[in-house]
Image (spheres, rainbow, N blue to C red):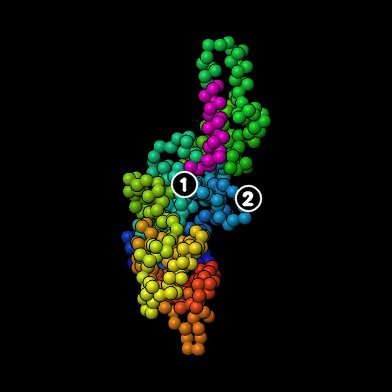
Amino acid sequence: RQKVRVYRSKVVESAMKVMQLYSKSRAMLEIEFFNEVGTGTGPTLEFYSLVANKLREKTTGLWIDHNPNNESLFVDAPLGLHPKPIPFINASTEMTQNSVSMFRFIGQLIAKAMFDGRMIEIPLSESFLKLALGREVEAHDLHNVVPEIAKTLDGLLEICEEKREILHSNISDEEKKEKINSLKYHGSSFEDLCLSFILPTDHNVELLVGGANIPVSIDNVEQFVETVIDSYLGKGVVEQVKAFREGFSSVFSLSHLIPFSYQEIEILMCGEHKQLSSQELKQHAKADHGFTLNSPVVQMLFEVIDEMDSAEQRRFVLFITGSPRLPFGGLSQLKPPLTIVRKAPEPGRVPDEYLPSVMTCTNYLKLPDYSSKDVLKQRLHVAISDGQGSFHLS
């Protein structure tokens, strides 16, 4: 094992330095935070979780954001993270180099986490993984990146096909011109669409020199479609894909992932993304040191977890393990297993005064013997919401 201390306040910068020094090491990384007492699996998983969160923030400018105007701190990427295209035109050397270096780092980070059997929640788009693995991508793969734009391009491609059929038909040139000029997109003329040669997800990026002032017409629609697809799946992301592949393969060969499906790779990288159930908890959790699985407060805990929404369950799993997702196989594969133990009050005090606490290195939940389900629910909510951000003695 290779123990490394990092600064929580500068976690990305620390992670980049750690990857430079240790990503190629066969030793398993074990992370500790300066000025904190935690050590082992919990802080290590939280390290990867913190870095992943930082890398998914809008301010990185690394990813396509499907909802750039919302107030969320994070990029909205329901189909997985896909690189924000580097402009064809007037891309600064600094912009390109920064993006390339970050994707090389991301490749190293994900590969090291996987090599060490850790989870890191950087869910990449299926199309990005296809490109990284050297698999062939086609126009329909755009549906896994920007589905609404892909639908629009599908309609424009249909018009392109109609145009080709007209050009190859046995009618006069004058009739061909008349028919082609009458082609419409869902009843609208090209003038009404108000499209120009700019990137649909970033109107500051021109697809051609002066693209903002070049309207899309029936005469250049094929070029527009090809250029947009090339931005998202070709030239616009080729440098990021190459850098990611280089970074990943510096740890272990990316080709080892080729036999796996996209869904399997995502689980291997990020962990399971499914709801916990009381039935699963009864099957795979343990109780010890004053509790059994039949203890009333343990049964109440299972009910409370069962009633949580997905966001609350993520916070609960992060509170217990240091990672917001469970490993491949779910709770049954959590090592050591989730263990619920009794948190005894000090003399003269009662359990309801205490919050639950955890030992993330052993997946121990120290649970006071609360007087009611309502009290348990309230105290657990406080713990999983406010009890993040550092490792101290409990």
Q: Answer left or right for 167 relative to 241.
A: right
Q: Please state the extent of the stretch shown in magenta in the rendering.
A: 144-163
* Residue picked out by circle 2: 69
| Residue 37, image x, y percentages | 44, 75
- Give me the residue at 41% from left, 56% from top: 272
The residue shown at (39%, 41%) is 134
Q: Which mark is residue 125?
A: 1
Give the image location of residue 206, x and y in percent: 60, 38
- Residue 209 in view (yes/no): no
Graded by Cα atoms within 10 Å as few (under 14), some (14 to 19) or many (20 or more), the crowding at tag 1 reads some
Identify the amino acid type marked 2.
Asn
Q: Secondary structure at mark 2?
A: loop
Q: Earlier in the sequence, mark 2 or mark 1?
A: 2
The answer to whether the residues at label 2 and label 1 have Cβ atoms under 8 Å apart is: no
The answer to whether 49 appears left or right of 67 in the picture is left
The tag on residue 94 is none
Per the picture, the main secondary structure of the magenta-coloured stretch is helix
**Quarter assignment of residue 21:** bottom left
Q: Residues within 10 Å of mark 2 (few under 14, many from 20)?
A: few
